[in-house]
Amino acid sequence: MSFPDNFTSDPDWEAYATRNGGPLPSNNTGLPSSEAIEPLNFDINQARANQADDDLERADSHPLESVRYIATLTTIKVRDGAEISVRISHPTISRLQQDKITAPLPVLFVTHGGGWIQGSHLSEEAWLLWHLYENFELAVISVEYRLAPEHKFPVWIEDSWDVLEALLLSNNSAFSDLGVQFDLKKVFLAGSSSGAGISAVLSQMCRDKGLPISGVILNVPAVCDYRHFPAEYTTEGQISSYRQAVETYSSGAMAMVWNTTQPSEASGSDPMASPLLGDLSSLPRHMIFVAGQDALRDE
């Protein structure tokens, strides 16, 4: 399978990358690179600190109050007794009154991106949520699952599932003091990159347990360990987008992420790690956003 037209650079992207020192691919013909895919080697703690700074800076310049939303932090105890941070965002009462919203709010359950090694509640606001805040009245529930490499697979799946179950499927009292009603019959799963991978897993788990989900939003999802791509879609063991994205670093970054989170290569084929390899039948509707120059594109 080849995508000869999908890897040419959009002029707006070229201008953005040039202004911000981003790498531009030289192989704009769309032909896969012949370079070996080598995992990037970077300091995880420094990457976390840099992202935290970026997230805080953006949050300061994009206060929820400017879109008439409000956020509340709470914690949920998961199966091993750990306390997991949960952020519940929803429109202010004045916005609901002004927009004449009287029905209970649909619920968006969000798992953030960051390669399962970094990220926070704030990360997903820049990735996915801000324009939803601007244009929709939703209850947004974000979970800060525990991260690799300090914590081992599948803890980020288990944390996310336990919070989903506690908050949405057990009529938990965490909503009772917020002053708004949430519609637990209209629950959507959402996430970006690795967080989208978690959402894809949760979707399969909900189906298996007979728990209704209204839909799933996967933003540039990471849904298959690069060492386990089905052979019929690969050339020299890699799908085209991984080979095309060598020069823009995203292939090497994803190889590093998978090697860190799945140091036992065999575990990467587990559908809880690679939901693309799981049972994809009878799932709710999925909306999938794809970036043409992303290593994850062909997944």
Image (cartoon, rainbow, N blue to C red):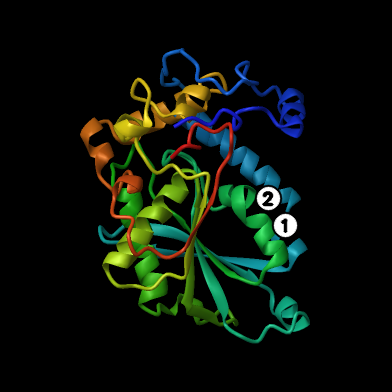
In the image, residue 120 above or below residue 96: above
Instruction: Report the quarter where the N terminus lies.
Output: top left
> Which residue is the site of mark 2?
59
Mark sitting on residue 122: none
Which residue corresponds to the image point at 31% horizontal and 30% vertical from the top-left?
227
Image quadrant assignment for residue 84: bottom left
Task: Classify residue 264 as left or right of residue 250.
Answer: left
Determine if residue 166 is in view.
yes
Secondary structure beneath disc 1?
Answer: loop
> Label 2: few (<14), some or many (≥20) within 10 Å?
some
> Residue flagged by tag 1: what amino acid is it?
Pro
Secondary structure beneath disc 2?
Answer: helix
> Residue flagged by tag 2: what amino acid is it?
Ala
| Nearer the observer, 113 or 66 | 113
| Nearer the observer, 144 or 109 | 109
Image x and y of residue 193, in percent: 49, 43
Image x and y of residue 132, in percent: 66, 61
Image x and y of residue 176, in percent: 50, 82
| Nearer the observer, 127 or 28 | 28
In the image, residue 231 above or below residue 176: above
Mark sitting on residue 63: 1
Residues tagged 2 and 1 counted as in contact (Cβ below 8 A): yes
> How far is mark 2 from mark 1, CA to CA?
6 Å
